[in-house]
Amino acid sequence: MKVTVIGAGNMGSAFVKQLTRAGHQVSVAARSGSKAAQVAAANPGARAVDVANSAVDADAVVLATGFADAAAALKSVGDLQGKVVIDITNPLTADYMGLTLGHSTSAAEEIAQAVPGAEVVKGFNTLFAQVLADGADFGNGQKASVFVASDSARAKQVATTLAESMGFTVIDAGGLKNARYLEPLAGLNIYLGYGAGLGTAIAPTWIRKA
Ligand SMILES: NC(=O)c1ccc[n+]([C@@H]2O[C@H](COP(=O)([O-])OP(=O)(O)OC[C@H]3O[C@@H](n4cnc5c(N)ncnc54)[C@H](OP(=O)(O)O)[C@@H]3O)[C@@H](O)[C@H]2O)c1
């Protein structure tokens, strides 16, 4: 698949690493062209591109900026009509220990409103960048899970295909509105990782009796 990753930070670089390893054609764009170039250089097969028009050829756009930058970033990448946008953001407070919105909306829904033509899917937001960068296999017979929520079946399928190609187990979390649950779940993960000292090699999943 042709994937454009917007953002070359912790999550953006981890996506570029895993998506290229999974055989996808990956472009990476960031405000800082040199950062994007550095990430592309570290991952053979990836290429750094300018932000402007970076989404034009993409089958999927991974939004790997902070939530505060999300709408502006998406508006700068070209026409998103009918494009699948994978929203991985968490709308965190400055101390990372809370969310700036929730209950009656979510970052994903706010982003979908900002780019009305795009098909937005929430996903990957419950994975620490370290988990994404290290890979889905936890080495104890368990794989990390990616929760996907979207009102677009196509967007959900694209996110599922990408996640599975990187080795993750996928859990269908319903419509985009359920990002209202997935973002607090990421908040709990962050609390457990940093607040409770479990570290960042952890990830939430769901289990079911046989
Ligand atoms: N870190 C984690 O473990 C983790 C886990 C799950 C979800 N998330 C979510 O993933 C997102 C990214 O987190 P992160 O830790 O990777 O952040 P980060 O390291 O700060 O990276 C953010 C990236 O976004 C780029 N960016 C900002 N505005 C942009 C714009 N208008 N156009 C293009 N690029 C732009 C920045 O570029 P410049 O550096 O050039 O400004 C930077 O490369 C956040 O929403 C976060 O909540 C993070």
Image (cartoon, rainbow, N blue to C red):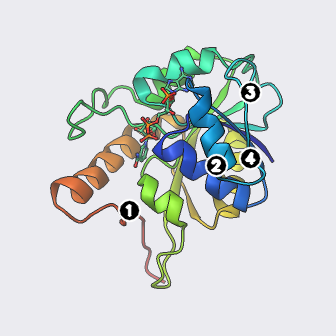
The residue shown at (34%, 49%) is 185
Q: Amino acid at mark 2?
A: Val
Q: Which residue is mark 3?
A: 55
Q: Earlier in the sequence, mark 3 or mark 1?
A: 3
Whole-Å distance between the Cαs marked 1 and 4?
A: 29 Å
Q: Seen in the image, is 195 located left or right of residue 10? A: left
State whether residue 127 appears in this view: no
Q: Is residue 199 above or below residue 39?
A: below
Whole-Å distance between the Cαs marked 2 and 1?
A: 22 Å
Whether label 4 touches label 2, CB < 8 Å: yes
The residue shown at (27%, 33%) is 99
Whether label 1 touches label 4, CB < 8 Å: no
Mark 4 crowd level (few <14, some 14–19, many ≥20, 10 Å Cα): many
Q: Callout 4: helix, strand or loop?
A: loop
Residue behind label 1 places its C-beta within 8 angstroms of ligand 1: no
Whole-Å distance between the Cαs marked 4 and 2?
A: 7 Å
Q: Which residue is mark 1?
A: 204
Q: How many marks?
A: 4
**Mark 2 against mark 3, which lies toward the viewer?**
2
Q: Callout 1: helix, strand or loop?
A: loop
Q: Is residue 182 above or below residue 89?
A: below
Whole-Å distance between the Cαs marked 4 and 3?
A: 15 Å
**Residue 16, labelled with which disc?**
2
**Residue 46, labelled with which disc?**
4
State whether residue 70 appears in this view: yes
Q: Amino acid at mark 1?
A: Pro
Residue 197 image point, x, y percent: 18, 62
